Amino acid sequence: MIQDSHAPIWRRVSIRCHGDLEDFLPRGRRGGWVLHPFCGRPSAKSVLEAAGVPQAEIDLILVDGCPAGLDCRLLGGERLVVYPLFAAMDRQPLSRLRPRPLPKAFVVDANLGALARLLRLCGLDSLYRRDFDDDEIVRLARGQRRFILTRDKGILHYSAVDHGYWVRNTQPQRQLSEVIGRLRLQSLLHPFSRCIRCNGLIQPVARDLVAGRVPAGAWREHRHFFRCDGCGQIYWRGSHYRRMAAHLAALGLQTP
Ligand SMILES: [Zn+2]
């Protein structure tokens, strides 16, 4: 038998994903060890991403039981165990890959406009524009310490992304529940404190100052008005407010 001396030498690692990192694996490969083939001496990051797991969602890597970085070089035969953010485990914080404290503000990908408005409705600082491109999102996330929320897994592969989350659900209200639950945002919620149009903060404004700027019916029926510091939009607690309050109540959120 003739062997080609230039043929690549294939090696394998065993990968075990914990928690919601399993969502990135094909259904038939969840719940146990996954064998992944490679050539050369790739980094843990490139092997994990080739297996479908974006680096931004990984918070701890153990290589043969020891904490390792994303740049750890693999030779073959190793056992990689990877954990997501918020995984319950007894490990020193220094072993974690994601810088702490975690960001409390967000930049929302162009494909999640409805979620961005719901996050603002809950008072969460959420930058969003329909024309955001990947470079701008990554720049805003790094420059302003914001968590990236996206439906595009590709952006979470960028090494420059420190904190990112791929939103699993496709329905906006389920997306809101998912993000609040997975990222543990319950204590940060202040419904109706932020403008859903521009992300500015909403402040009470004297009723006289909004005369002529709101519909006559709203002016007659309401005593209290609010104005966005950013775009000047006027708000009051009308039927739209009641519908949104009912929606937030269904999520277990108190409204003022
Ligand atoms: Zn505004």
Image (spheres, rainbow, N blue to C red):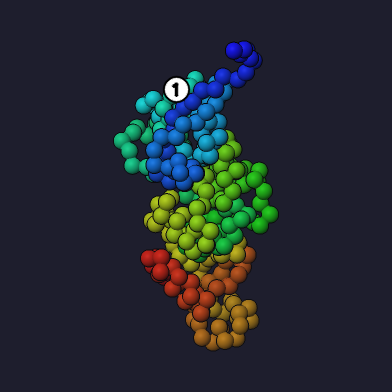
User: Is residue 188 found left or right of 205 in the rendered image?
Assistant: left
Mark 1 burial class by Cα count in 10 Å: few <14, some 14-19, many 20+: few
**Residue 148: image location, x then y, percent:** 55, 47
Q: Quadrant of residue 88?
A: top left
**Residue 2: image location, x then y, percent:** 62, 12
Quarter of the image where the N terminus is located: top right
Mark 1 within 8 Å of ligand 1, using the beta carbon:
no
Q: Amino acid at mark 1?
A: Gly
Quarter of the image where the C terminus is located: bottom left
Q: Nearer the viewer, residue 184 or 143?
A: 184
> Which residue is denoted by mark 1 in the rendering?
77
Say above or below: 168 vs 217.
above
Say above or below: 45 vs 227.
above
**Residue 254: image location, x then y, percent:** 39, 67
Q: Nearer the viewer, residue 123 or 81?
A: 81
User: Helix, strand or loop at disc 1?
Assistant: loop
Residue at the (49%, 25%) spot, across then down? 12
Q: Quadrant of residue 255?
A: bottom left
Q: How many marks?
A: 1
Say above or below: 100 vs 40.
below
Q: Nearer the viewer, residue 252 or 54?
A: 54
Residue at the (45%, 41%) spot, across then down? 29
User: Is residue 60 found left or right of 46 in the rendered image?
Assistant: left
Residue at the (59%, 38%) spot, across then down? 158
**Residue 163: image location, x then y, percent:** 51, 42
Name the residue at the left extreme. Answer: 90
Q: Is residue 216 visible?
A: yes
Q: Is residue 127 visible?
A: no
Residue at the (51%, 52%) spot, across then down? 167
User: Is residue 155 found left or right of 66 in the rendered image?
Assistant: right
Name the residue at the right extreme. Answer: 131
